[in-house]
Amino acid sequence: MAPLRVPPDEASGPLVGGGGPVRGIRPSYSDPRVWAAPGDIVSSPKTATQRLDSVIATVIQPFNDSVAVAAGQKKPGDWTFERNGNKYGIDQKYIRLGKVSIPTALLALLPINTTGNPVVNDRNRAQSQLHSDIFSQAQRGMNEADFKKAVKSIRERKERERAAALTSSDKKTRPADEPAAQNPVNRN
C-alpha cells in the first residue's frame, strides 16, 4: 500500500484547527487578513481655518436665521438656504432639493405621524375600537329595525291574502242566490 501524501504547504498562516496535515487560516471577524476592521471616516483634510469656520457656522446659523425672520427676509418655518443659485431645505410649500421641488403635502402620506408615547397609542386604539363598535351596533340596529319592518309588512300581506282566500272559498261553496236548505221535520 502506498503511503498517504501530504500536499505541499501553500498557506501563509499558522497551523489551525487543532492540528492536521494542512496549514492555513480559519475565517473569523478577528482575523485582519479576512476582515478589515472599520477605520475612521475618510474625508479630505481641513485646514485650521476651515475647521474654525465650520464651528462658527454651526453656532451662528440659528442666530442668522432668527435675524433673517425678524428682518422679513425669511418667513417663519422657512428652513432653506441657497447654494450655487439653487434652494435646498424645506419651507411652507415645498421640500427643495436644488432644481427639484416636492410639495410638502406629500409628507402627510408618509407613515411618520405616529407617536412614540405608548399611553397615547393605547388611548387612540381604545377610542378607535369604541367608535367602530358604536358604528357597527348602530348599523346592526338599523338592519334589525328594517328586518322587523319587512317581517311585519309580509305578515300583514299574508293575512290579507288568507282573508281574501277564505271569503272567495266561502262564495264558491255557497252562492248567495241559492236558498238555504230546509230540514224536514218529522211530525208523527
Image: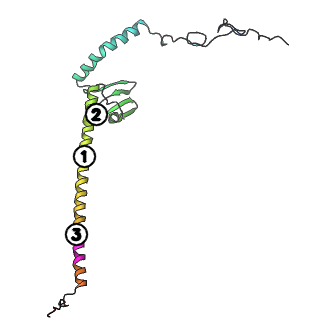
Which amino acid does the dot numbered 1 rest on? Gln
Task: Name the residue carrying label 2.
Answer: 125
Q: Which quarter shows the N terminus? A: top right
Nearer to us in this view, 82 or 16: 16
**Gap in angstroms between the C-alphas marked 1 and 3:** 33 Å
Q: Position of residue 141 (x, y in %)?
A: 23, 50
**Gap in angstroms between the C-alphas marked 3 and 2:** 51 Å
Quarter-of-image position of residue 86: top left
Nearer to us in this view, 114 or 71: 114
Disc on the earlier residue, 1 or 3: 1
Q: Which type of secondary structure does the marked residue at label 3 adopt?
A: helix
Q: Which mark is residue 137?
A: 1
Span colored in magenta: 156-166
Task: Name the residue carrying label 3.
Answer: 159
Q: Position of residue 60 (x, y in %)?
A: 30, 14
Q: How is the image coloured?
A: rainbow
Q: Position of residue 127 (x, y in %)?
A: 24, 35
Quarter-of-image position of residue 188: bottom left
Residue 13 located left or right of residue 46: right
Find out whether residue 126 is within the magenta segment: no
Q: Which type of secondary structure does the marked residue at label 2 adopt?
A: helix
- Give the answer, above or below, for where 40 lies relative to 145: above
1 or 3: mark nearer the eye: 3
Disc on the earlier residue, 1 or 2: 2
Which amino acid does the dot numbered 3 rest on? Glu
